[in-house]
Amino acid sequence: MLYIIGLGLGNEKDITLRGLEAIEKCDKVYIEAYTSLLSFGISSDGLSNLEKLYGKPLIVADREMVEEKADLILLQARDSDVAFLVVGDPFGATTHTDLVVRAKQIGVDVEVVHNASVMNAVGVCGLQLYRYGETVSIPFFTETWRPDSFYDKIKSNRDLGLHTLCLLDIKVKEPTLESLCRGKKVYEPPRFMSVGTAIEQLLEVELKRGESAYNEDTTCVGLARLGSEDQIVAAGSMGQLRSVDFGAPLHCLVIVGETHPVEEEMLGFYTIKE
């Protein structure tokens, strides 16, 4: 059996009882470490806390391991119980859907244990979840790569009066272009996009596209470390939020659409005072 288990967002204690019981059955326990991270990251101390609570040694599964050695994980799950731990909910990233498909293709049984994710925890800001449109991802721009496909989706949501959740890029164990050219991988330091960087990039794309999807006065909500005790939620214009220090990762951004009076009342609790 392959158990794909959501860990929630805050810390090691956010796992469900069902998830904990599943881990206890498993011979191997992997923890995915590239689509998201818990509030304490995947440091040695953080892993130690997880291992103490879960009672099992953890194998950190970075992007390379999952992409290159997924078959090994699945073959282990053919003959024994294997857990694959995912921050948030198992289906918060398409990578994990692919793992389920590949498992089923070779006859491995899969059990999924759900948990909280950014997709529902974002409701803490007061914007009602059923009034969101398509979620978009904002990647880090480089000197030669400045994609803007997210702009059309944001504009479509805005035209319909819907809110847009923007998931901000994280770079963990990314090989440098130079090292790939040399055939020996050297990795960049981890990077996590901030609300401020996301807004800078969004405004750059608006300037280029000029279709009035949003502007510096557009109301947004910046959120940091959702689900943790020190989470931050702040509402204001793009211009205001651009200079707010939201602290440590992970961050996300909501571009607000048309609002209901109850939504406006809730947003008022988080609005930056001039």
Image (spheres, helix red, strand yellow):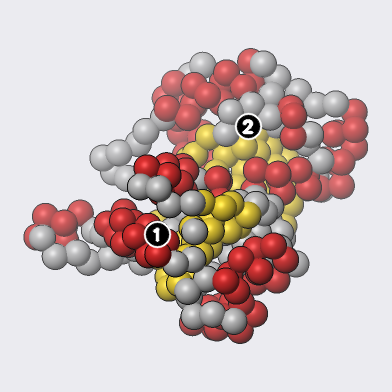
Residue pictured at 56% horizontal, 21% vertical: 155
Q: Residue furthest left?
A: 182
Indicate the quadrant where residue 7 lies. Answer: bottom right
Tag count in the figure? 2
Where does the image place residue 46, in percent across and percent down from the top left? 56, 78
Residue 149, placed above or below residue 159: below
Residue 23 at x, y = what percent? Answer: 58, 70
Q: Which of disc 2 and disc 1 is earlier in sequence?
A: 1
- Mark 1: amino acid: Arg
Viewer-nearest of discs 1 and 2: 1
Q: Is residue 65 visible?
A: yes
Residue 78: give its label. Answer: 1
Secondary-structure class at tag 1? helix
Q: CA distance from mark 1 to mark 2?
A: 40 Å
Q: Say whether residue 248 is visible.
A: no
Find residue 210 and report its horizontal and vertical position in percent. 48, 19
Label 1 Cα neighbours within 10 Å, binned few <14 / some 14-19 / many ≥20: some
Pick the residue in front: 31 or 127.
Answer: 31
Label 2 element class: strand
Q: Which of the 4 image quarters holds residue 184?
A: bottom left
- Report the disc number at residue 164: 2
Q: Could you tell me which residue is drawn at 20 percent across and 54 percent down?
A: 177
Answer whether labels 1 and 2 touch (C-beta < 8 Å). no
Of the pair 265 and 79, the residue shown nearer to us: 79
Identity of the amino acid at label 2?
Answer: Thr
Residue beneath the point at 57% across and 34% down: 135
139 relative to 207, above or below:
below
Residue 209 shows which numbered tag?
A: none
